[in-house]
Image: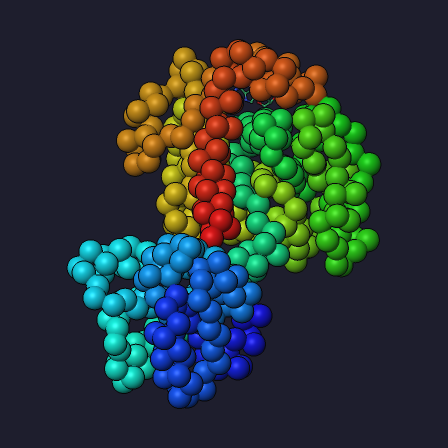
């Protein structure tokens, strides 16, 4: 519809109540080059024609009835995207000009109007109309592209250069917590040699990332989810290979593909990792929107976090991508939290206490956040999950505002 408007030149609609005035405008406009025009004498017909034929410019008499010209202009502008309106009146007073502008008219012309003045007013109005329509078309195309392209997941890598810091414990609780809050969540175990995500969740792996990438070179997220375990929280889990020697069969390219594909089908993708920088882990760190660095309140751990920061600074990650989570943050021999923050020059996002509940839950294949939500550690884990809400909300809010247009 937008196209035929452009191809057939300018479309004019004239709506004037007084017969003589209407005829004189119609006659004058017959000479307007390249324009097609429609003429009517009342507001009901004017609105009907405007909606039906989407004119570029409407010329409306202020004395129109049954609705007056100002109301008619307002109604037409509300219903016809990109239209420009001109009002014409005999002996207009200053208040009429204000009403015209408030109704959304481009201009108010005083009858009698010279042909030259009329033509240049129409010319200006139609230029505005063209610009508005081009902008609207751009917006619509962008909105459609947004609709078609599924929103990409927020990617989080849980990382630490030290083993046993609680990566798997935090990754599983964060993922299951987000899933039970209604988000679509995937957890990928990239600790390819010794991954224990499935066990921590009480799940028995059948097919793993190794089976996926050794069976297919190309796959979509639907096929991928066939290879994933389903946890009672709603979480989908892609387990690590069953045997350590299968780890080497999962290439850097495979890891990149897995992460890109999984990002298309979930709100959140959480990745658990081994305790060292290697090629495939680096690929995951690059891919991630956030990296949770897991540390503890002791000198070696703080030193490790510092080294991690230096390494990641070299990779030019933005500072807000890296978040510190302190686990077992209450050990009696440990350092003071604020001391650690000062040493690192960065705030600690969340602390999680030490508790016998943690190994108990892991050994039972339970998610502590879900099985003991009111315990101290349960509440701290809930705070960690909540930390993710603002990102999601911002995203949604932007989306919503865009779509409403
Ligand atoms: N907050 C905690 N309190 C007590 N024990 C913990 C805590 N966090 C982790 N653990 C224990 O530490 C061990 C290592 O945790 P895990 O999550 O497997 O570490 P990683 O994946 O970093 O190697 C597990 O036995 C776990 O029960
Ligand atoms: Mg682990």
| Residue at point 75%, 35% (across, down) | 229
Q: How many marks?
A: 0
Tell me residue 292's x, y (percent).
Answer: 48, 36
The one of 3 and 42 positioned closer to us in this rendering: 42
The one of 290 and 306 positioned closer to us in this rendering: 290
Residue 71 position by quadrant: bottom left
Tell me residue 16's x, y (percent).
Answer: 39, 68
Splitting the image into four quadrants, where does ligand 1 fall?
top right
| Residue at point 68%, 42% (across, down) | 192
User: Is 306 situated left or right of 193 in this image?
Assistant: left
Image: 206 above or below 44 = above
Residue 67 position by quadrant: bottom left
Q: Tell me if residue 228 can be seen.
A: yes
Q: How is the image coloured?
A: rainbow
Image: 131 above or below 205 = below
Q: Tell me if residue 129 can be seen.
A: no
């Amino acid at each position: 519809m937008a196209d035929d408007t452009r191809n057939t030149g300018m479309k004019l609609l004239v709506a004037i109540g007084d017969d003589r005035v209407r005829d004189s405008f119609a006659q004058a406009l017959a000479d307007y080059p390249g324009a097609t025009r429609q003429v009517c004498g009342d507001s009901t017909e004017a609105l009907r024609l405007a909606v039906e034929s989407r004119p570029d410019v409407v010329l409306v008499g202020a004395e129109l009835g049954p609705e007056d010209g100002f109301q008619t202009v307002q109604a037409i502008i509300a219903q016809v995207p990109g239209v420009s309106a001109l009002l014409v009146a005999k002996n207009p007073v200053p208040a009429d000009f204000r009403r015209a502008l408030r109704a959304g008219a481009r201009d108010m012309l005083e009858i009698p109007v010279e042909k030259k003045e009329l033509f240049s007013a129409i010319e200006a109005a139609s230029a505005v109309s063209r610009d508005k329509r081009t902008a609207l078309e751009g917006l619509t195309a962008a909105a459609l592209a947004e609709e078609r392209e599924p929103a990409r997941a927020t990617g989080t890598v849980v990382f630490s250069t030290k083993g046993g810091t609680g990566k798997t414990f935090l990754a599983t609780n964060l993922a299951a917590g987000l899933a039970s809050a209604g988000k679509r969540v995937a957890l990928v175990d990239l600790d390819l040699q010794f991954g224990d995500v499935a066990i921590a969740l009480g799940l028995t792996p059948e097919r793993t990332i190794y089976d996926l990438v050794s069976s297919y070179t190309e796959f979509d997220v639907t096929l991928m989810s066939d290879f994933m375990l389903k946890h009672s929280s709603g979480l989908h889990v892609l387990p690590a290979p069953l045997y350590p020697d299968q780890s080497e069969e999962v290439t850097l390219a495979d890891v990149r593909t897995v992460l890109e594909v999984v990002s298309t089908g979930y709100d959140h993708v959480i990745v658990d990792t081994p305790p060292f920088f290697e090629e495939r882990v680096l690929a995951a760190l690059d891919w991630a929107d956030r990296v949770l660095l897991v540390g503890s309140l002791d000198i070696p751990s703080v030193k490790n976090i510092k080294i991690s920061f230096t390494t990641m600074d070299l990779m030019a990650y933005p500072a807000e991508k890296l978040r510190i989570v302190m686990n077992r943050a209450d050990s009696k021999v440990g350092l003071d939290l604020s001391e650690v923050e000062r040493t690192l020059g960065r705030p600690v996002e969340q602390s999680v206490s030490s508790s016998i509940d943690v190994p108990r839950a892991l050994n039972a294949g339970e998610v502590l956040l879900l099985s003991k939500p009111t315990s101290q550690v349960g509440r701290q884990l809930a705070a960690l999950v909540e930390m993710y809400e603002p990102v999601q909300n911002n995203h949604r809010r932007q989306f919503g505002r865009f779509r409403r247009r």
